[in-house]
Image: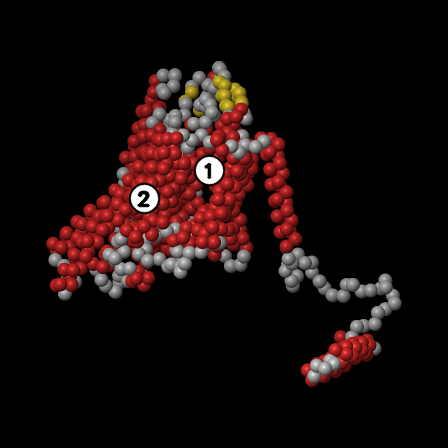
Amino acid sequence: MAIVTETEVAASHSIALEDRTNSLANGKGNSHIQIQHKNHHHQQQQHQQHQQQPAARQRPPRSKYRHVAAYHLEVKPSCLSRDTQHSPSFLGFRNLVVIVLIVMNLRLVVENFMKYGVLICIRCHDYRKQDLALGAILYALVPCHLFVAYVIELSAAQQVKGAVGRMKRDESSSRTSKELSAFQTTWRYVAFAHSINASLCLLVTSYVVYYYIHHPGIGTVCQFHAIIVWLKNCSYAFTNRDLRHAVLNPSPDNRLPEIYKACPYPNNVTISNLSYFWLAPTLVYQPVYPRTDRIRWSFVAKRVLEFIVLGVFIWIISAQYAAPVLRNSLDKVAMLDWVSILERIMKLSTISLVIWLAGFFALFQSFLNALAEVMRFGDREFYHEWWNSPSVGAYWRTWNRPVYHFMKRHIFSPLIGRGWNPFAASLVVFTFSAILHEVLVGIPTHNIIGVAFAGMMLQLPLIAATVPLEKMKGQTGKIVGNSIFWLSFCLVGQPLGALLYFFAWQAKYGSLVYQLSLYIYHPSTITSATTINISINHQLLTINYSIDPAKMMIPVPDGYGNIIAVALGAIPVLGFVHGVITTLKRRDAGVPYPNSYATAEQCKANPKAEAFNCAQRAHTNFLENAPQTMLLTLVAGLKYPAATTLIGTTWVVMRCLFLYGYVYSGQAAGAGRKYGGAFWFAQMALWGMAIFGVAKPMMQTPTSPF
């Protein structure tokens, strides 16, 4: 009956529509008549469709009993259960998380304002006129090293032009031994000149910043600029060396990228070409880059505005929120109150994360895109989706693409081409990157304490731990790897590093006054008390703390942090590297656990078994010598901190060469281990300083030998 009723209603609507159409159709011709026919035809089609509907679609008649309705008619799982057919949406939870984060941070804003008031002050920065003058001079002079590199390369290009001209005249590509000798001598001079020029670029800046520029912000800008120009210098020299070699030795194996044909060597050795590379947002030199058609000045204005706004935001957050947390953490660090230090790190993690994310967007999205637009630089893939990194290694490959391109092109790939193992090449890359991080952070803060270096080197265990998670099928492994990345990034990395460098800065230049000694005592020998006084800028904190020392007092000298970094940082990391290499070689050789070595028969049948034996023996030799070396380093450093740091670092380097020669040199019976055999001399030197320099005076007199 419902269908008949709907049809009647539709027909009545049709008749009404026809009446309205007729009333409006006076004097308007056949077009309105056609409209009437179309409407009538449409209503007839609707009537036929209603009649053809199956009876199953008809609404069932309702029962007059309302309390007997059956609501449970089939098996249905809960929407959060694994058995559900449809994945639920978590949009509401996402909104809740955003609201909670906003409310929590607003509470921190209010709490900070109530506790400290407004701490933002333009005139409160402790900079000197000398800092500004030297910073401006350094910033202007550092790019001159690029043009020195141009002069060096121009002289080499003249040699190449002469050689190519002689080859064309003689219609032969062969050269005499005298010409080859002359070329090799010239290339050595060119390489030496490039090395001196690039080294001076970084060394002079580092020296001036460390000894003459007090303000860490100004020093960081100068040091950052010098490192960028230094990397560009190296890329310019390496690339032109290969281009020069390809021109002098044409062969099918010396293929160059197609894009380079637009500017072949030595046509690229010009001031304009080098100037473009100097200003381009890349660290990798190419004679030709992809270019855009025009400059969009509106795009540039937006990016510049973003950069300025984010810069002001970072400054406000640093002054108003980060600085008080850091100041209030000094007493906890001085007293080694580990629970309070952990609480401060967690509190600082949110602030440092916000500052880092704002800095990342300001530099990589705003500044580099604005610079690329002005330079019409086409390749603007300055980063990938690093926030979704399924492993720590994926993060380092995606977050800073300009540096990644430099490391891969000029360090990793050449080492792989020389036959290095990928893991060994990666180790060299991370060591190089760790040194650059320490130079970038330690020199402007006038505290080379090894924290940035150790932080980078400790990424290797995290990378090794998260690589299997990245390769797992499904999303579970990637989610776990991404969580590990964020935890290490937010809690361990930046806040801890910022806290330690701030503490070192305050201890050296701030108003933090402390008298802290390392006391070795027996409870029965306590006879006196010593007070440790700590005061902080703006009178935020004053602490008097009394401890009972012993008769024997061993003061910790300046620079002892470097001793700890070598003994408890570098040596354990090298032990981890030994373990990883041994495990990989065991897997390749197919030697099952718990066998310590492959048998002689296995070595004859499989060369990889011999390599495993070499790696295992190198690891065992390391374990035989590392514990005593760590202890000797810690003891000898109490009296000879500088010499112990140098000798301990030499020991680590020699052990790296020992490992490489033993495992990767390819010499029979691991004879390549002799590359690092000098570690014995370093170890004996540490033993002599610990026994005769520290222990012997202590045995001769009851007082301190220091």
Q: Height in image: 176 above or below 491?
A: below
In percent of the image, x 50 and y 38: which residue is there?
315
Q: Can residue 464 be seen at all in this image of the molecule?
A: no
Furthest residue in direction front, as rendered: 27
Q: Position of residue 472 (x, y in %)?
A: 50, 57
* Sooner in the amino-acid sequence: mark 1 or mark 2: 2
Crowd tier of the residue under label 1, counting other residues whose Cα lies within 10 Å: few below 14, some 14–19, many 20 or above: some
Q: Which residue is mark 2?
A: 143
Specify the label residue 497 is tagged with: 1
Amino acid found under the numbered disc labelled 1: Gly
Cα separation, mark 1 vs mark 2, equals: 30 Å
Specify the label residue 211 is tagged with: none
Query: For the residue labelled by badge 1, is the local secondary structure a helix, a strand or a loop?
Result: helix
Q: Height in image: 34 above or below 247?
A: below
Amino acid found under the numbered disc labelled 2: Pro
Closer-to-camera residue (192/641) = 192
Closer-to-camera residue (316/550) = 316
